[in-house]
Every structure is written in structure tokens, then in C-alpha cells.
């Protein structure tokens, strides 16, 4: 049943405790005797690799799951949540990584979605808008209540999510990867808001893979590994290396690409234009050249044409104007199969939609485009022993964790699926590699491995276009950085020549020249 909104002074949580939480799924112990607490006026960060149990734990706190054992205690009183509505009534809110907003509705309509109106069946949007403005001003969350969500930037949409939680009276707010799609400036603005909320007495749980952000914003850190608590420490007593070691159980290698002599231009993009799915132009004259032995990173906030560019380069989207050349050969109108034969490999953004077939086995997914090649077939007959030997070699070389080669891909973790796709695409020794969001949703250990493999491929002479919304990843791996905004390249800079502030300004639509002047 929909719940009525509360004003912020109706409920103030002082302390939440999760005691000896156990949660099982078939064949998996997701949480094992986990103890976690958060107090009013603090940011408690929750860290761990994929599959460590972070999301499962927080879904129990938000009422999406019910613990098999253990209890949740709010201000000394045990509580049982049967649904998120129960958690909301108790003063708990959650900001999901993928925003839960309805684009065609206004900000005010999204804020009250699912709530009862005091004047049923009439919606009192004027009163709602007034309350939204009050929260906006009180917490520095600038947003127009009458604006449609589809008109808002990603950063503005996140503000709406926070206002929505505050409108419902949330005293404790769980933030799941809140900075994943924000520019550096938007992250800075968000942290100002979060610090203000803490001063007002809110309790915040901050889930992130970005350790420098955890170090900056949190008061305490709890690390989970394999469903168990490894430790809880005051953040000021920890270093980044301490956190990494707690998360993965070892020291991480420092990724530092060494400059090498680049080869000739292998990928040339000239004045590329294309239409988006909604009939608007998404690429507006993109021109980039990438040399062999070079990584060019494409930085930008999600939705500025990155996906459309990757699809044009891979042959999945029609180019309306412009030209794509691979080693001086025009591939603009080639289907993907012919581009693969010409030397292009593609690691797609949506690995389960575009990169793998869920029901197919590990081995079958390794040969989706290559089963008919002379290496694995004799005329119309497949060479199954050779295919199996090759698949076993790839699984071992790329450390894909799978019970056996016949395991359906849907049973693997996200990191292992990504390694499998990389194994298939890199096994061809491509001349050009398009790597779109290669570590999205992948834990720190798998990320380290993927970064190493990309640099190995770069050192082997491949021209790599790295498309990522993770600015740290872009700056770590790229030789040059191109910044995209609303389908246009704002500038291309050498990695060591541009500051984070300059790149962030360009990501917000500021020209390269003006960004340099502003940050000088």
C-alpha cells in the first residue's frame, strides 16, 4: 500500500545496528554473521569486491530481502521489514545506482510517485513543489520542481533522488555507487550536500568502488569479503593500500603504462554523424585518429554519444555522415563480420545484451563469431577437439573462473563474463580494439587484470579506443584523452597535460581553451 510522506522532523534515527545477519541463496552464503552499524551524523562506507555481500546486506536494511538469521535494531528496538515501504516508514531511504525515476514526469510528480495525496483523488502538486523547493534550498540541491526528468542532467537527476528520499522523511540514506556517472564537478557538489546532511544529523551509508572518494567523504569503513566482515575502522586511520589489502587479501599492482613509440594511424574517424534511437542526432561531426600502440580514452558523462559511437564503429548502428577507416580501408558500411575479418574487435558496454548469449556455454560463447574460421573447421564440419583445446587455453590464460567449459555463461559472475568476452576478442590479435566500459560493475581484482590485458594489447601494437565513464580509469590507461559532450569532441589532450578540473569542465560542455583558462 502507498505510504504517506513525513516531514523531516517527524523521525530522527540515532543509531541502526545489523546484528549477526545471515542470508542464503541456493548454493550461496551471501552474508555470514555480518554485523554493521551506522550512527546519526556520520558517513559509514561499505566496501568489498563484487559478490562480497554489500548489496545483499543493504537490500535487507531497505526491506527488499528478509534476513534468514540475525536482526535489525533501530535506536534499541528490533524491527522487521517486509518491504521497502516498511523501511521508508522507519526513516530509511535508498539512492540506487540506476535512478528510479520516470522520465516523462516532472520532478514534483516523481517525488510523490507512490505516495497518498491528502486531497485524494486530486494531486496537490503546488504544495509538493513548495516542499521540494524548501528541501532544495535547505540542502543546496538546485532543481526545478516543474522540470521534466528527461530534461535534466545526470547530476540533477541524482538531486531529485535525494530530495525524494528526504521528502519521505528519510533519516538514514543508503547511497549505492552515487558518483558512478557524475563529472568531477558534480561529485564535488554532491559531497558538499552529503556533508551538509551529516551536519543536519542524517546517517549515510556510502557504497563505492572509488577508494579516493571513500577516503574523502567517510568517517568509518567496513570491508566485506566472501560475505564476512573483514574489519571496521575509522577512515582517518586507514590508507588506500590498507583498504585494498582488506578487500582482496593482497597488495595491488601499480598500473603505470610506459610510453612507447606509436605506429601508423590504424583507426581514422572523420566527421562522423549518426541518429539516436529517439530520432535526434547523437554524434555531431566526430573526428579522431588512433595510432597503433596507443590508447585514446573517451571521457564524458553517460548519454553524450559514447554508446552510439561504439555502435557505429562496430557496425551495429548506421552512419548518416562521415567515414571510418581501418588501416586505410573504408569500413563505414561494412557489417560486423567483415570488420572482424579486417582486424576490429569490440568489447561492448552491455555484455549480456551484445557480448554474450546467457544460455550458451562458456565454450560456445568463445566461438560466437569464429566457429567457421579455418582454424576451427574443415569445410562444413567443426573441429570440436581443437575448439575445446582452444577454449581451455583461453579460460586458463584469462583466469576465467568456471566449473567447466559447458557451464552456461549466465552462471558466471560479471567479472568472469567480462574476462571471457575479452579472451574472445583479444585472441584474434586485433589491429583495432573498441573497449566500451570494460570494467563497469567489475570488482577491484578483476579490474586490475583487465587493465593489464588492455595495456599488453596496446604494447603489441593495437590501436585502442577506451570508452569509460570512470575518469580514474581513463587517466590510468590512456595516452591521450578525448572529451565528448552532446555528441561533439570538446578537445583531445595528452594524459599528463590536463588536470582533472580541466577534463571535468570539458565534460560539462566547456571548450578546451576556456577550460584551460578557468583552471589556470
Image (tube, helix red, strand yellow):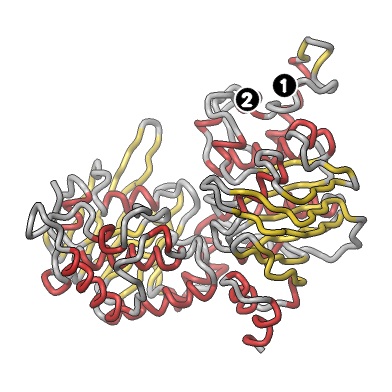
What residue did someone put label 1 on? 388
As rendered, which of 443 and 512 lies closer to the eye?
A: 512
What's the residue at 50%, 31% (across, down)?
411
Element type at mark 1: helix
What's the residue at 42%, 73% (across, down)?
190
Vertical relation: 230 (above or below) 8: above
| Relative side of 198 to 283, left or right | left
Residue 55 image label: none
Element type at mark 2: loop
Q: Provide residue 509's location: percent of width, then percent of height.
A: 59, 72
What's the residue at 43%, 74% (across, down)?
235
For residue 487, what is the image quadrant?
bottom right
Question: Dot 1 surroundings within 10 Å: few (below 14), some, or many (20 or more)?
Answer: some
As rendered, which of 355 and 342 lies closer to the eye?
A: 342
| Label located before the other in sequence (2 or 1) | 1
For residue 82, what is the image quadrant?
top left
Q: Provide residue 18's location: percent of width, then percent of height.
A: 25, 57
For the C terminus, the image quarter is bottom right
Residue 405 image label: 2
| Relative side of 159 to 341, left or right | left
| Relative side of 398 to 404, left or right | right
Q: Provide residue 352's location: percent of width, then percent of height.
A: 55, 37
Q: Please give the count of numbered marks on the rendered protein.
A: 2
Amino acid at each position: 500500500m502507498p505510504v504517506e510522506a513525513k516531514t523531516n522532523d517527524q523521525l530522527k534515527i540515532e543509531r541502526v545496528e545489523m546484528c549477526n545477519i545471515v542470508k542464503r541463496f541456493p548454493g550461496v552464503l551471501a552474508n555470514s554473521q555480518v554485523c554493521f552499524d551506522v550512527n546519526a551524523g556520520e558517513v559509514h562506507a561499505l566496501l568489498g569486491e563484487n559478490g562480497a555481500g554489500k548489496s545483499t546486506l543493504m537490500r535487507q536494511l531497505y526491506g527488499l530481502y528478509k534476513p534468514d538469521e540475525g536482526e535489525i535494531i533501530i535506536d534499541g528496538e528490533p524491527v522487521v521489514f517486509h518491504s521497502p515501504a516498511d523501511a521508508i516508514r522507519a526513516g530509511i531511504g535508498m539512492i540506487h545506482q540506476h535512478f528510479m525515476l520516470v522520465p516523462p514526469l516532472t520532478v514534483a510528480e516523481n517525488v510523490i510517485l507512490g505516495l497518498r495525496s491528502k486531497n485524494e483523488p486530486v494531486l496537490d502538486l503546488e504544495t509538493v513543489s513548495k516542499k521540494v523547493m524548501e528541501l532544495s534550498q535547505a540542502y543546496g540541491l538546485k532543481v526545478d520542481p516543474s522540470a521534466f526528468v528527461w530534461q535534466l542532467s545526470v547530476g540533477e537527476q541524482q538531486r531529485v533522488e535525494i530530495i525524494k528520499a528526504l521528502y519521505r522523511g528519510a533519516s538514514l540514506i543508503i547511497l549505492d555507487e552515487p558518483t558512478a556517472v557524475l563529472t568531477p564537478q558534480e561529485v564535488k557538489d554532491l559531497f558538499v550536500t552529503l556533508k551538509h546532511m551529516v551536519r543536519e544529523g542524517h546517517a549515510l551509508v556510502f557504497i563505492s568502488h572509488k577508494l579516493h572518494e571513500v577516503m574523502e567523504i567517510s568517517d568509518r569503513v567496513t570491508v566485506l569479503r566472501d560475505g564476512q566482515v573483514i574489519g571496521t575502522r575509522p577512515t582517518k586511520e586507514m590508507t588506500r593500500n590498507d583498504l585494498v589489502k582488506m578487500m582482496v587479501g593482497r597488495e595491488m599492482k601499480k598500473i603505470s603504462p610506459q610510453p612507447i613509440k606509436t605506429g601508423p594511424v590504424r583507426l581514422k574517424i572523420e566527421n562522423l554523424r549518426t541518429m539516436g534511437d529517439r530520432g535526434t542526432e547523437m554524434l555531431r561531426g566526430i573526428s579522431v585518429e588512433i595510432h597503433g600502440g596507443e590508447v585514446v580514452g573517451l571521457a564524458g558523462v553517460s548519454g553524450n554519444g559514447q554508446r552510439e559511437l561504439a555502435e557505429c564503429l562496430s557496425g551495429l548502428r548506421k552512419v548518416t555522415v562521415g567515414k571510418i577507416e581501418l588501416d586505410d580501408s573504408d569500413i563505414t558500411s561494412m557489417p560486423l563480420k567483415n570488420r572482424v575479418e579486417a582486424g576490429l574487435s569490440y568489447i561492448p558496454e552491455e555484455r549480456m545484451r551484445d557480448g554474450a548469449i546467457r544460455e550458451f556455454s562458456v565454450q560456445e560463447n568463445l566461438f560466437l563469431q569464429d566457429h567457421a574460421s579455418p582454424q576451427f573447421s574443415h569445410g562444413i564440419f567443426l573441429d570440436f577437439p581443437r575448439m575445446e583445446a582452444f577454449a581451455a587455453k583461453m579460460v586458463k590464460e584469462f583466469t576465467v573462473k568456471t566449473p567447466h567449459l559447458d557451464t552456461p555463461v549466465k552462471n558466471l559472475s560479471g567479472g568472469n563474463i567480462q574476462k571471457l568476452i575479452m579472451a574472445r576478442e583479444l585472441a584474434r590479435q586485433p589491429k583495432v580494439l573498441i573497449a566500451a566500459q570494460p570494467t563497469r560493475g567489475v570488482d577491484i581484482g578483476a579490474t586490475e587484470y583487465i587493465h593489464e590485458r588492455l595495456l599488453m594489447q596496446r604494447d603489441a601494437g593495437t590501436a585502442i579506443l577506451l570508452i569509460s565513464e570512470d575518469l580514474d580509469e581513463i587517466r590510468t590507461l590512456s595516452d591521450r584523452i578525448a572529451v565528448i559532450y552532446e555528441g561533439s569532441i570538446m578537445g583531445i589532450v595528452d594524459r599528463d597535460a590536463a588536470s582533472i578540473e580541466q577534463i571535468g569542465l570539458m565534460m560539462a560542455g566547456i571548450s578546451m581553451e576556456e577550460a584551460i583558462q578557468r583552471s589556470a
